[in-house]
Image (cartoon, rainbow, N blue to C red):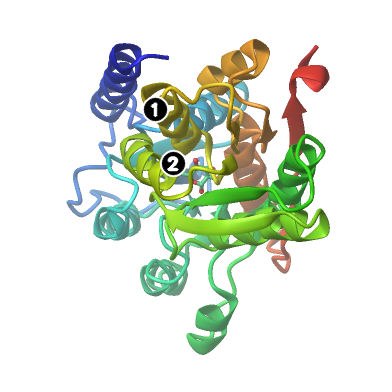
Amino acid sequence: MNRRTFTSSFITLSLGAFIALSGCNNSAPAEKPGDAKAPEKTATATEKPKIALIMKSLANEFFLTMQKGAEAHQARNADRYTLLSNGIKDEQDVSRQQQLVEQMIAQQVKAIVIAPADSKALIAVCKKAIDAGIVVINIDNKFDAAVLKDQNVTIPFVGPDNRKGAKMVGDALAKTLKAGDSVAILEGVPTAFNAVQRKSGFEDAMKAANIKVVASQSANWETSQANKVASALLTAHPDLKALLCANDNMALGAVAALKAANKAGQITIVGFDNISAIQQLIKEGGVLATADQHADQLAVFGIEYALDILAKKGTPADKETPVDLVTKEKSK
Ligand code: ALL
């Protein structure tokens, strides 16, 4: 991908996100999530429960896929619940996500299924939702166990083992390298537990193969930041053999940085998410591997879980969802 293609795909993604933010935020058009005004009536026991899905950046294809999966599930289960789906524009806009939770509390939803942008900062507002009688399910990025304990709150987590997923990707990479080689990691948002777990999984795999991690830096899940960080790493470490990216959006930025530095084909890139642009690059050989955490199913698992709890009022427990290695061989 040259600079121009990179820029235009970035614009396409951003445009897609804009359309998503302005058009698809809400599966129940009569109830705009942006309006935090007090509901006109109190829900009765016979009414279908409203479930709110609160995601992170809709500029990331991962969350658009998640949203589509949730909407398809709701369409198949229209008699069971209504869905309000929301996202933010910027991966780090934690305060916007907090506002979304507040708005969903004001709308008296029965359950909130949330992929938090930050593993600590969203807990207090989720506790507020629980105190208001709302079932809260944590998906994708796990809340911090110590802060949950501190605030005396239990929120079940439905999502993959990110350390395991990253280890699988790292192991696939290690097979193509030799002991003593140098690699670098591009981390996600450091206050997100899944970003930390993925970094650890990459490190586990490199350690097991005696490969040196000479640098590890955050690019906050973003393509453009990853592009800058990767360019700087290529200059600082000319002997680098691979870049392990904690998500595919950052892998796209790293791929563009390699092209710009005329190093395409000399340095191996791996990612995490299995977005369509990376699937294509895996086929072409521009990226070695990624992990599929089944974005289309992640929110669905959370919604089903919320419906179960609403129906049986059982004790919530964590639930691990699948994560699979994707390589050229595996996708044949
Ligand atoms: C994580 C997801 C995805 C995504 C990232 C960016 O929580 O699991 O890997 O790319 O958020 O927001």
Mark 1 secondary-structure assignment: loop
Quarter placement of the C terminus: top right
Quarter occupied by the N terminus: top left
Rendered residue at 55%/18% (across/down):
276
Which of the pair 6/18 is nearer the observer? 6
Point 59% across, 76% down: residue: 145
Please indicate whether residue 235 sits to the left or right of residue 242 in the image: left
- Would residue 46 appear left or right of 95 to someone viewing this image? right
Percent position (x, y) of residue 220? 38, 50
- 3D distance between C-alphas at marks 1 and 2: 8 Å
Amino acid type of the residue that numbered disc 2 sits on in the rendered structure? Leu
Q: Is residue 311 depicted above or below 126 in this figure?
A: above
SS assignment at label 2: helix
In the rendered image, the vertical position of residue 263 relative to residue 132, given as above or below: above
238 lies left or right of 223 = right
Identify residue for label 2.
Answer: 234
